[in-house]
Amino acid sequence: MITIPYCGHDFRNPDKDRIFRPSGTNSWLFLLVLCPMIFYFPDGKEIPAEAGACILYTPGHPQHYQASDEFLNSFVHFTCDDSLPDNYGLIKNKIFYPDCVTELNNVLKIIQRESLNRLEHFEEMEDLLVRQLLLHLSRCHPLSHPRQQGRYYPELFVLREKMLEHCERPWSLEQICRQANIGKSQLYRYYEQYFHASPMDELLDARLARAKYLLGNDAMTIKQVAYTSGFQNLCYFNRFFKNKCGCTPTEFRSLHITGSRTD
């Protein structure tokens, strides 16, 4: 069970306040920086951090940082099995910039609310929320500096979410490039850099996932499933589905849907 000794959301200290814990703490500390700060490390390095930076301190590791002006951050101290954060392959005791700052700060806000209100089963909720925080961190694309996101990241991030949420629409490379105001070669290069996949591969995967879900509805024909999922050519849908799943949509419905109902 994960426990939370202390946490804070949009926490303000006096201007230019300094935190100095040379022996660290007996808990883990996840810190989300919301103002420019300077971090000091045992090897003598001084690293400036901009808003959006994060650090995950391990128990017993020295903690030393100071705000450049205003002191503002969100954080959570938590105790758990020492091996738990290692299961997520997280960066520890180093500054990094995740590409999911909003999601992380929202989770920290809910953690603080649970810690303050202490409603029924709040211990279980705190455990779940810290695990959610660690999962977000494991999925984030860590950068050494926020500017590495590049000028196209915000537009591509929003466009990607829209494309995958509405995968049934007739998306094309030309349309994506036009909306992102980017050329095809740049689209492929930056999309791969940011999301570790190609836009068309992700779009097809989203359509396939929707089709597999819709096949559970016996009221829909295979043709309706294909079109509703974004496949406008039924023959292509059947070939693509069989190539990816090892069976036709009809066989999938019989084996995985009908079969599971009779178990």
Image (cartoon, helix red, strand yellow):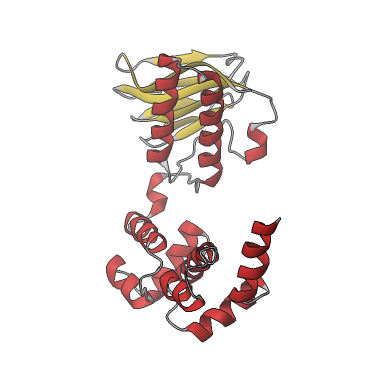
Q: Which quadrant holds residue 118?
A: top left
Residue at 59% of width from left, 27% of height from top? 43
Residues 147 and 247: in front is: 247
Placement of 175 over or under 75, stated as above or below: below
Give 131 or 179, whichever is nearer the viewer: 131
- Residue 246 lies, in percent from the top left, at 68, 74
* Residue shown at the point (40%, 30%) measured from the top left: 33
User: Residue 176: x percent and y percent?
Assistant: 34, 70
Closer to the camera in the image, 156 or 133: 133
Observer able to see residue 244: yes
Kindly tell me whether residue 63 is visible in this rendering. Answer: no
Between 246 and 18, the one lying in front of the other is 246
Assign the N terminus to one quadrant of the image: top right
Tell me: residue 202, above or below residue 146: below
For this orientation, the residue located farthest to the bottom is: 235
Q: Report the side of 103 relative to 237 (left or right).
A: left
- Residue 154 lies, in percent from the top left, at 33, 54
Q: What x and y, as percent, mark residue 208?
A: 53, 68
Q: How many marks?
A: 0
Quadrant where the C terminus lies? bottom right
